[in-house]
Image (spheres, rainbow, N blue to C red):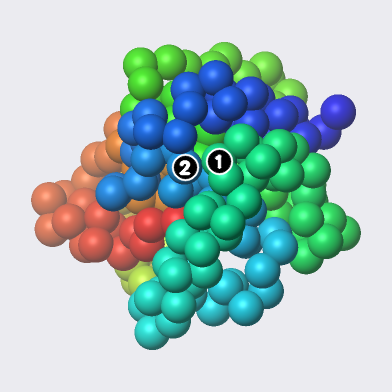
Amino acid sequence: MKFAQRQRAALADLLEELGPFAPTKCEGWKTQDLAAHLYIRERRPDALPGIGSEKFAGRTERIQMTELHRRGYLPIVQAIRTPGWIMRPLDNLVNASEFFIHHEDVLRANGRSQALTAKEQQALWPIVKVLARKTQVTFEGQLVITRTDTGHEQQIGRGNRPVHLTGLPSELLLHLSGREAEVEVTGEADSVARWRDAIKGL
């Protein structure tokens, strides 16, 4: 079973166990809202524009609530155990980060955690680098990332006032998605502030 599949299955199990009204780390969302988001993301193409754009967010929210009330929480959780037709061809590529991050959103909001293997940490590393490069474009400075599991250092961009990120790939990914994470962020104060401003939540 691939990483995305394992995270999907574990998240679905957790959602089923906790029920529809448990907290998540997604602001304003209970577990039922997160489940509905994952459902429409893979099955309602008309809802996709609002996931990445404020302009269409209201329509996406209405579709999300409609599907939740029409189908019910547990049927939606069962449905998201299998990739929807929109994402199925790219499941591992697109959903490794999506389901890992949202799995952590529920785990951490409920005082739980998961331990990833070295292979799973490595699976997240390419995604970390992609998000880091994307964020560095907005930051416009030098970024230095150090993995605490392997010691590998990755430099992105140029500048004489770099920001250093140190942590596991899993924690770095959460940091880059706008979540609280066990990542050490160091550098000159104004550079660190600009870096944090550059991060866009997922």
The image shows residue 79, relative to residue 201, as above or below, that is: above
Residue 19 at x, y percent in the picture: 48, 27
The quadrant of the image that shows the C terminus is bottom left
Between residue 33 and residue 170, name the one nearer to us.
Answer: 33
Q: Is residue 124 left or right of residue 153?
A: right
Q: Looking at the image, can residue 95 be seen?
A: yes
Between residue 186 and residue 89, name the one nearer to us.
Answer: 89
| Mark-to-mark CA distance, 2 and 1 | 6 Å
- On residue 32, the disc is 2
Per the image, label 1 sits on a secondary structure element best described as: helix
**For the point 38% across and 84% down, which residue is it?**
55
The quadrant of the image that shows the N terminus is top right
**For the point 64% across and 45% down, which residue is it?**
76
The image shows residue 172, relative to residue 18, as above or below, that is: below
Looking at the rendered structure, the kind of residue marked 1 is: Tyr
Per the image, label 2 sits on a secondary structure element best described as: helix
Q: Quadrant of residue 62?
A: bottom left
Q: Residues within 10 Å of mark 1 (few under 14, many from 20)?
A: many
Q: Residues within 10 Å of mark 2 (few under 14, many from 20)?
A: many
- On residue 73, the disc is 1
Q: Quadrant of residue 121?
A: top right
| Residue contact at pointers 2 and 1, CB within 8 angstroms | yes
Q: Earlier in the sequence, mark 2 or mark 1?
A: 2
Count of marks overlaid on the render: 2
Looking at the rendered structure, the kind of residue marked 2 is: Gln
Q: Looking at the image, can residue 155 be seen?
A: no
Residue 190 at x, y percent in the picture: 13, 58
Residue 87 at x, y percent in the picture: 77, 59
Q: Residue furthest bottom?
A: 55
